[in-house]
Amino acid sequence: FEGVYRREFGDSKTLTRPAGIAVTDVNGQRRAYVVDTGGVSTADHRVVAFDATDGRRLFEFGTRGTKDGEFNLPRDVAVAPTGELYVVDGGNFRVQVFDADGKFVRAFGDVGRQGGQFSRPKELAVAPDGNVYVVDAAFGNFQIFAPDGRLLLDVGYRSNVDRPAGFMLPAGIAIDVDGRVYVADQYFRKIEIFAIEPNAK
């Protein structure tokens, strides 16, 4: 692997503030779903789908708002094993779920300080078993949800001192094929790795 540049897609006409991306195959077509965060001066709070092979803009879904299928500062997108799309709707303090063509399916979460709620949701990842992992920068943790939005477990805590599972500004999360969870903390400049035991769920 050498990181050879291939091509690019998207421009100022198709994207405002791209923030997250997920790539998957849909009926033989490789699609790239790009989260467009938008801003205070635009309604372009959305997800834009591109053909990842030739860069064609295929469609988009979402606009600024609070209703089902609408977004307020969306942050990230991930594809589940079922093909469903999970989108962090940061300003609405929830995760929304869509089918591969952008049709709203369901949502979970709201603003608050309790488990299953969100304060500053940042990124998310979907595990091979379909569970959804959401990083919250204000809580200093990540929460694990069943595909239907039921809270299973929260891991980590907000800390002013760099300790195992102590986070000041967690911002990124990824899961490998073996189910190990990788969490990036911007403030402490670290990556922590977790193994989630099945009986903990």
Image (cartoon, rainbow, N blue to C red):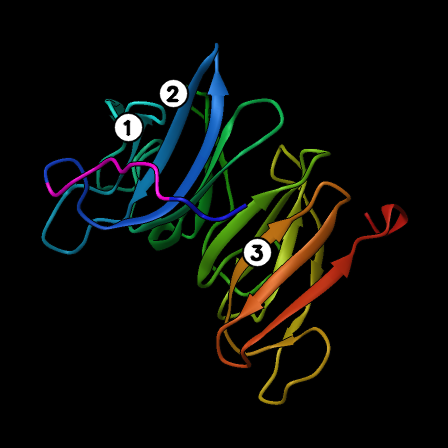
> How would you rate the neighbour count of disc 1 (Cα within 10 Å): few for under 14, some for 14-19, many for 20 or more?
some
Q: Which residue is the site of mark 1?
A: 61
Q: Where is residue 158 in the image (x, y as percent from the top left)?
A: 60, 77
Examine the rendered structure and indicate whether residue 82 appears above or below residue 33: above
| Residue furthest to the bottom | 161
Examine the image and state in which quarter residue 12 appears: top left
- The alpha-carbon separation of the residues under discs 2 and 1 comes to 8 Å
Could you tell me which quadrant the N terminus lies in? top right
Q: Which residue is the site of mark 3?
A: 173
Determine the residue positioned at 65% across, 59% down: 182
- Secondary structure under the numbered disc 1 in the rendered image: strand
Label 2 vs 1, first from the N-terminus: 1
> How would you rate the neighbour count of disc 3 (Cα within 10 Å): few for under 14, some for 14-19, many for 20 or more?
many
- The alpha-carbon separation of the residues under discs 2 and 3 comes to 25 Å
Disc 1 and disc 3 in contact, CB within 8 angstroms = no
Examine the rendered structure and indicate whether residue 26 appears above or below residue 90: above
Query: Residue 62 in magenta?
Result: no
- Secondary structure under the numbered disc 2 in the rendered image: loop
Looking at the picture, tell me which residue is in the foreground, 1 or 139: 1
Q: Give the range drawn in magenta.
A: 5-12
Q: Which amino acid does label 1 sit on?
A: Phe
Looking at the image, residue 95 sits to the left or right of residue 125; the answer is left
Q: Position of residue 175 (x, y in %)?
A: 65, 48
Q: Which amino acid does label 2 sit on?
A: Lys
Examine the rendered structure and indicate whether residue 138 appears above or below residue 37: below
Q: Which residue is the site of mark 2?
A: 103
Determine the residue positioned at 18% across, 54% down: 39
Looking at the image, residue 146 sits to the left or right of residue 5; the answer is right
